[in-house]
Each structure stands twice: as structure tokens, then as C-alpha cells.
Amino acid sequence: MSDPILSDLNEPQRQAVTAGAGPLMVLAGAGSGKTRVLTRRIAHLVARGAARPAEIMAVTFTNKAAREMRDRIAQLLVNDGTLATSSHLWIGTFHSIGARLLRQHAESLGYSAGFTILDSSDQKEVVKKLVDMMEFRHAYWTPERLANSISRWKDDGIHPEELGPEQIQKERDRQQVATFYQHYQSELQRTNCMDFGDLLLKPLLLWQQQPQLLEIYAERFRYLLVDEYQDTNAVQYRWIRALASIHRNLSVVGDDDQSIYSWRGARLDNILRFSEDFPDVRVIRLEQNYRSTANILTAASHLISHNSGRMKKQLWTEDGAGDRITRYTARDGQAEADFVADEIEQLVRHGQSFSDCAILVRTGRQTRLLEERLGRRMIPYQIVGGIRFMDRAEIRDALAYLRLVVSHQDDLAFERAVQTPKRGLGSVTLQQLRDQAAEQQLSLLNVSRRLVNDPGSDLRPAVRRGLGQFVELIDQSVAMVVNGANPAGLLDHLLTHSGYLASLEQEERFQEKQDNLMELRNELERRQDLTAFLEDVALVTDMIEQQKNLVTLNRVIISTLHAAKGLEFPVVFLVGLEEELLPHKLAVNDGGSAGLEEERRLTYVGITRARERLYLTHALQRWVGTRPVDVVPSRFLAEIPSEVVYSRGSGFSINRGVSNQGAKRWGQW
């Protein structure tokens, strides 16, 4: 009887799954089955008794990937007849595992276990509020730049007192920003909140303060597995080294050729220097591709071979050559968009669906012309990176009420909830609450409770009445939770008795907003733990994770290259292959040769999203302002072998008579 864990694996995959103890690096090329290897290795470790489920930690980069991994492992262990449960495995993102650790030890860092996790939008709101409170005014250090920089510094493991000339060159600016950073951290602690960076940085701080605690975790997890290792940042790297310090059974899976997130802190060096950190590492390369045709792989391999900072591997496939890649040269951006729309119509006419097609762009501004042309042709499309469901105003309003019930210290939630609907609280009253909260070291909710119960407070009667009703509503809701109310019933109570639902009836798109709130309620019906639900909402912010379900709709997907990583489509249009666009001028100007190599990796990722047909398009002119400007084809086009390319458009013949499977199938369009 064949082993279900090892069946249908090729030889390198089997070697990776069955590798024994010690450090292991799996270099997994695009479409080579890395997820299969990761899940099978975990199942194999449990099935052969190398470790119990509770002794294994697996880290991924999206919650969706973590859920899928857990489900696959559970099925494998059931099929294998192993009496083990995957529920004891620690599988999750760095952030979710960080939150899990911190909730167990929050008091050691001056927090309570029910701390609120701020997503990036919440973080920016806190920064803006603090900028106003501190009267921090600086032409360069805007609230958005402060928020983004603080996130980056945390990813790099840098605390406020550790800011140096490398981060901010001018000493005066450095002192000002360091002070702001410190106040920001103090504000988060006062309100019992942590941002995403804290979920990574504070476990390290905890382990530094309590080395015995690190030893407990490092001893507990006999095997540590990390997916997408090329995307790890400095703090995540330190995490991994620390947790693997005792057993050294660290398995990392990644692809240096798909490292495209340096702008958010990812460090390619983490994967390139792994063998220096672990000299006895076993390296296994997964080079057989199960996604794309041979012509597409040839193009990708030749392109990426021009990078020097990489660990060499060569993708190959048992499938045939497939259609040659279409390179289309358009006279201008409008003609390029027309060509893409024409081709999609032809493809659909010959049996493809709209959802088989993806248009990949380097920057979001490229989508305008494409949207216009697709709209004219009545071609349905979906923009990846649109407003997340959880980011819609009515959903964030509802979540603010729920967050405040869970944590009375959540001032950000208080300010949003108390003003929706309006309760007669103007900016003056709100500032009064803020001032007293800061003075008395209390949350806004607790200060409000004191003021409405104090006959001597100078609150206007209307404000006292509105604020009192709000405080009473929150207190009633807390009592409901204590008495076992389910989250959906709690939401009903909050939205009805707050007057929020009634206020929505006066707004445009009332039905759409009501439907969205009902969808939120439906999700809460399936949940028992409100705190866990709110944590999931805060943690699920990864752009790729949000958009993977879109491919089930019959719409053309328009996506940036960064957001498309992890997706695949039968047909891909990679548009705008021009100098200063791809490669992008800022990446090359600011990053030099390293920036250029990352742009080449980004193009490689785009090419390897295609399964069957690939189009590479560029224009001879683009409109800049009110005038057309000549543009130069991307240097990356010259790095793709001509024998796998079929050229069309301005300046090219249609290549009639050239053998091309695509031309034979569809005719000369």
C-alpha cells in the first residue's frame, strides 16, 4: 500500500519531505510545488514520530495559507491512519503567532492580555491624532511618512532610542522624530494597543528580558518550518534564529528569484546567507515546474539569469513548448489598451472565460486606460487592491463598537463609535475628553463615565444625555458578553440601540451598506469568541490573501505585479514594459544595481504567473501631462530569447508564415 504522504512526489520533493534532522533549505522555483512539500514534510514528521504536533511550528505569510496548510495536514494524517490532531500544531503568520505569544505574557510588558491589534489604517489614525496633540509640524516628516517609517524601523528591530544617522541624517530631526516615536509607543501602551510591528518586535523584547522564556519555547519546538523565507525581514530573521537555537531543526522554503518586497522590509540576504548561518545545511532544489509551458519557462529563466545576487536553479517542465510569447509594440498607451481588450474578446470568443485572463501592471496609475477600454467593450473586470470588505466605512464603524466592548482602553474605537451616529459631541467636547484622559491617565470611555456621573461637570445637557446613553450602551453590551451572548446578537444590540441602523437609512447606498453589515453579522454567527474574531480581522490585511477569491468570479483581473504574487492564470498580459516604468525609475535611481535586480525579479514573477499564454506589451509613446513623450522599450525584453517570442504591432510585421501554435489556433488577429 502506497504511503499517501509520499505518493505523487517527484524525487527532489520526496528528498525534501523525508530529510532528517538538522537545517534544511528548499529552493523552490515558481510553480514547483513548494506548498505540497511543506505540508507533506510536517505530516511526515508527525506520522513517523519525529515530533508531536505541539512540537512543530510552521510560519506562513497569509492566514489563508495557514488554514489551507492545516486542512491539508489533517487530511494527510487521517489518510495515513495516524492518530494525531493537527489542531495542536502552531501554524500561522509571524503576526498571528506573535499575538498568540504576547497574549500569554502581555503583563510582563505592561499590557493586558486583551490588547487591541491596530491595522495600518488604525495606526495612521493614532499618528495623526498624536501629531495634532504634540503640535508636531515638519514639512518632510508628515503623518504618513512617520507611520510608514515607524513600521519599517520596527521591522528592522529598531527602538526609538536606537535611531541613528543611518535612519535620519540630521541630528535635530532625529531627536524630534525619536521623541515622537517614543510618545507613539507610550500612547499605544496607555490604550492597550499594539500595531503590527509590535507583534514581531515585542516577543524579541520579551525574550531579551526573560531568557528563560525563550529557552522554554526553543526547547518546546523541535521542528521549525518557514514558508516564503525570501520575504522575511530583520526581526523575523532574529525570531527564527532564536527559536531554532537549541534543536537546529529549521526548514526554510523559498525562492530568491521571487524576492520582491524590499520596500516593506524583506531582506534577500536572509536566504542568500542561510548556508553561512547554518554551514551544515542541506540544500534541495525544486526545479520541475507544474504550471507553465516550456516557452514561458525559457523566457523566465533567461531573464532572471542576468541577476548576480541569486542561487542558481533552472526551471523545466515535462509539458510541451506551448504557444510562443506575444510581444506587442503599440504606438501609444491607448493603442496598447485597445490591443489588450481586443485579445481578451478574441480569447473569450474561442472558449476562454474572462477570469482566465489577468492584466499585470507595475503601478496603479496604469489601470486608468485599461479600465476605460474594458468598460467600453463591456468586458467585466476586477481591480486587485480595491477597498477591502473590512475597510468599508460601515464595517469599520461596527467593528469600533465591538472593539470598545472588548477593550475599554481602545480610544481609537471610542472616538469612531461615539461619533457614529452623531450625539452632539463637537470637536471642543472631544478635545475636553482627550485632555482629561491624558491628565488622569484614563481611557476616553472611563473619563466619559466619570463626567456623565459627576453633577458638577460642565457638560451641556444634550452632550451629557448623548454621552451617558453611549456609556450605558457599552456597559450593557459588556454585561451581555459576560452572560454568554453570541457575537452576532451583540452586534444586533449595538447597531440597533445606538441608533446606527436608523441613521444609515438617511444615507446614499443604504441598501448596500445594510447588506454589508448583514454579511458581517453572518460571519459573526459562525464565531463564538469575539476577541479571536477581532484579532483575525486585524491580522488579515495581506493584499494577496484578500484577492485570491476573486479568481472565482468571471471577470478579468487587473493587478499590480506585487499583488499578483501567489496567483496564476491561463492568460497573462504584462503591460508597460518600458524603461522608467518596468524597471521603474525610482527603484533604479534609489536602489542602483540592487534595485534593478529586484525589478527584474518582479518581471520574473509576472511572467511565471502565466500558465498557457503570455503577452508582453509596450508603447512607443506615453502621454505625460498634455503632450506625448517617446519612451524606450524595457531592457528586460532584450533578455528574453527571440526564438520563444512572436512579435506584433507597430514597427513589426505580423510574422505571417512563422510557425506559431497560437496563430494556428486562433488565426491572424
Image: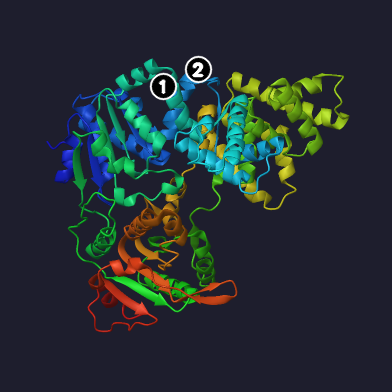
Residue that appears at 71% across and 27% down: 444
Image position, residue 567 (x, y; %): 37, 53
Q: Residue 413's image quarter?
A: top right
Q: Is 188 or 361 nearer to us in this picture?
A: 188
Q: Which residue is disc 2 drawn over?
A: 108
Q: Secondary structure at mark 2?
A: helix
Q: Amino acid at mark 1?
A: Trp
Q: Residue furthest top?
A: 212
Q: Is 330 or 18 nearer to us in this picture?
A: 330
Earlier in the chain: of badge 1 and badge 2, it is: 2
Left or right? Give the position of 279 relative to 405. left
Image position, residue 364 (x, y; %): 51, 59
Q: Which residue is disc 1 drawn over?
A: 207
Left or right? Give the position of 524 relative to 77. right
Question: Is residue 415 visible in the rendered structure shown here?
Answer: yes
Q: Residues within 10 Å of mark 1 (few under 14, many from 20)?
A: some
Q: Residue 13's image quarter?
A: top left
Q: Is 318 or 360 nearer to us in this picture?
A: 360
Image position, residue 661 (x, y; %): 25, 73
460 relative to 138, above or below: above
Which quadrant: the C terminus?
Answer: bottom left
Q: Secondary structure at mark 1?
A: helix
Left or right? Give the position of 536 relative to 327. right
